[in-house]
Structure formats: C-alpha cells, structure tokens
Amino acid sequence: MDVPLALRECLEFVIGSLITHRDKVSITQSQQDNRLLYDVLLHPEDAANLIGRHGHTVKALRNVMAAAAHRQNLRVALRVEPFSDSPDTP
C-alpha cells in the first residue's frame, strides 16, 4: 500500500468534510527521507474553520495523520494557510 497516497486521500476527505469552499483547496505533498510534508492552502474562512479555536481542530488532524504514519515509521507535518487575495509584490 502506498502510505503517502493513502494519507493524502484521508486528508482530502477530512478537509472536504470540514470546509465550505471546496473549489478553493490546494494540497501539495513533499517527502524527504521518512518525513512527509503537506501544505494546505484554503479560502480564508475555511482556513480559520480548519484551524479551529486555539488550534484544536488542526491539532487533532495532525495527531490522526501522525498516528497513521507512525505504523510505517514516517513523520508527518501539516501546514494550513489561507489563500492570499492580493498578488505577491516584490
């Protein structure tokens, strides 16, 4: 079983269940040795909802992802950020 793919599908399912702007989601995955990094970009309202009060929701999601990855001796990092409405300025 491809663990990084399974973790990504799990992450997509959970995030899709918690947000309202499903068309404004971007999840990127990178891997270095035994560490997986997931960057999640969301609509600002959805980012606030996913993070939750005092970060409780995102912390719970990180714990679930870490527990699933631990069985395969992998570490997981999850970063949640809102999309920026303004273009990047140099």
Image (spheres, rainbow, N blue to C red):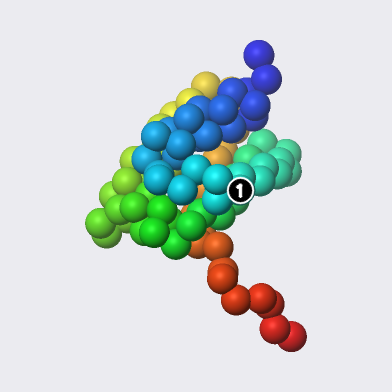
Could you tell me which residue is drawn at 70 percent across and 44 percent down?
A: 30
Q: Which of the image's four quarters has the N terminus?
A: top right
- Residue 88 versus residue 34 in the image, above or below: below
Q: Which of the image's four quarters has the C terminus?
A: bottom right
Could you tell me which residue is drawn at 46 percent across and 36 percent down?
A: 16
Q: Which percent across, then down, holds residue 46?
A: 41, 53
Q: Which percent across, then down, holds residue 2?
A: 67, 20
- Residue 90 versus residue 61 in the image, above or below: below
Regarding residue 65, the answer to whether it shows in the image is no
**Disc 1 packing (10 Å; few <14; some 14–19; many ≥20):** few
Regarding residue 55, the answer to whether it shows in the image is yes
Identify the residue position indicated by label 1 in the image. Answer: 26
Give the residue type that dot 1 points to. Answer: Ser
Q: Quadrant of residue 17?
A: top left
Position of 66 with respect to 51 (left or right) is right
In terms of depth relative to the viewer, which is nearer, 15 or 85? 85
Could you tell me which residue is drawn at 60 percent across and 76 percent down?
A: 86
Q: Which percent across, then down, holds residue 22?
A: 50, 43
* SS label for mark 1: strand
Position of 84 with respect to 20 (left or right) is right
In terms of depth relative to the viewer, which is nearer, 17 or 69? 17
